[in-house]
Image: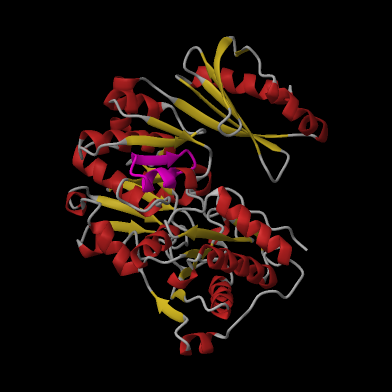
Amino acid sequence: MAHISFGTSGWRGILCEDFTFENVKVVTQAIVDHLLAAGEAGKGVIVGSDTRFMGRRFTEEAAEVLAGSGVKAFLCSRDVPTPVISFEILRRGAAGGINFTASHNPPEYNGIKFSPSWGGPALPETTRDIERRANEMLGEVCYRELSLAEAAKQGLLEEIDPREQYLAALEQKIDFDALSQIGKLALNPLYGTARGYLDAPLKKRAIPYLQINDHLDPYFGGQPPEPSEAHIPDFISLVKNDPAIRLGLATDGDADRFGILDADGSYIEPNYIIALLLDYLIRVRKMTGGVARSVATSHFVDAVAKKHGVPVYETPVGFKYIGDLITQDKIVIGGEESAGLTIKGHVPEKDGILACFLVAEMVAHEGKTVRELLDGLYGQVGRFVTRRANLKLSAALEGAYAGKVASVPKEIAGTAVTDVITVDGVKLLLADGSWILFRKSGTEPVVRLYGEASSEARLNEVMEAGKQFIVG
């Protein structure tokens, strides 16, 4: 029997192996018991899924378990973006949300993401309690169920579609009138939940757009539903070969991550988008507050924050920590290098739909390409080049890893190490402003290697030195 373990964004597993109906019922019952113990279950739970195989069936099974304990399920009538579930939790004042999604993972995966009443991803103390309860129940028929028909009869099941309410709220956060001046946009929801969300505001205003991959396909066209450069070659080709397109906007399978293509089809790293939007929100929108970024995210963000005199909050990897700062109203924007961001006054959860439209608003308002905006900001705060690599470890190297990072070198790539940060992994700051981060995967013999420098040549040196330190 599988061991239930929640990662940075919920419990994920391979369909028919560990992600089974039986285990889903156990995890749902553990969430129910957690809410009952906290005295919040009476407020009901939002239940939704992305576009993966059996998503609707899993949501129905969860609804039956919720109803079995007398907890009302607000069951989404179609696949729904992760940020929309967060929005609906807050709008209804619900106890939380159970979201069946594996985000950008390949199609053989599914997962359960639990969001508590504050709307963001559950913090570690919450997931630890759910994990404990679930693992104590594995192998037993310990869950309680009530059929959907009986649940509806007893008022414990209500089917909802939060799309219109979310889009209406988005109208208050994006200057869609400015977008009417931008020209043609290209959209790519990657067969995921942003269908009917990315295109709707544009259609409403007759803003020209071209959309691809906008039908249901649980195989996601043969690629993981991740809007990174490696997985969207068709989209890049489309934008590159259509001179009328001003910007390409993509989202992942559950629409919590974004991918941006400039007018020439070039892919813009999420790190740079976060820095550009921070500058735009403060300089143009006059928003006030700090900025949050994960430990693996570019210090380009820090340079922009310094320019505007606002604080930077460095968090562990996992958007829950950034969401918590949004809830505390401490930040203008929070983001991660893995293409997740949100802003002040919005949900405390990654929102790829919001991110796409913010970039489009920025480009429309400034009247420049993303690259032109980026070069202009580089001219003010300096240049930053970032990269991530995966280092596979042999059994011997994996055994030696903890000892290596416990005793870090005094210099990397010929430059002194000035500080060591252990917020999440081991991050070495260098005297020339470069940095490198080692993060060990919790599920496989891999070290995530992140680096940043002021040029490609310098970054190559830093990354190679980091690689040699681990595997050389």
Image-quadrant location for residue 26: bottom right
Above or below, 298 against 187 in this view is above
Residue 247: where, in percent of width, then height? 32, 46
Residue 176: where, in percent of width, then height? 21, 53
Q: Quadrant of the N terminus?
A: bottom right
Task: Write the residue at 63% across / 78% down.
Answer: 144
How many discs appear?
0
Q: Say left or right for 457 vs 176.
A: right
User: Which residue appears farthest toward the right when viewing the image?
Assistant: 396
Q: Which colour scheme appears in the figure?
A: secondary structure
The residue stretch that appears in magenta: 322-339
Image-quadrant location for residue 20: bottom right
Closer to the camera in the image, 333 or 30: 30
Q: Say left or right for 176 vs 195.
A: left
Closer to the camera in the image, 81 or 372: 81
From this viewpoint, is residue 50 visible?
A: no
Closer to the camera in the image, 44 or 371: 44
From this viewpoint, is residue 146 visible?
A: yes
**Residue 323 magenta-highlighted:** yes
Task: Write the residue at 47% across / 33% down.
Answer: 297
Q: Quadrant of the C terminus?
A: top right
Q: Say left or right for 351 vs 402.
A: left
Above or below, 156 against 321 in this view is below
**Residue 324 magenta-highlighted:** yes
Task: Write the residue at 22% across / 44% down.
Answer: 364
Task: Write the residue at 74% across / 29% down.
Answer: 401
Residue 41: where, in percent of width, then height? 49, 69
Image-quadrant location for residue 422: top right
Residue 378: where, in percent of width, then height? 33, 23
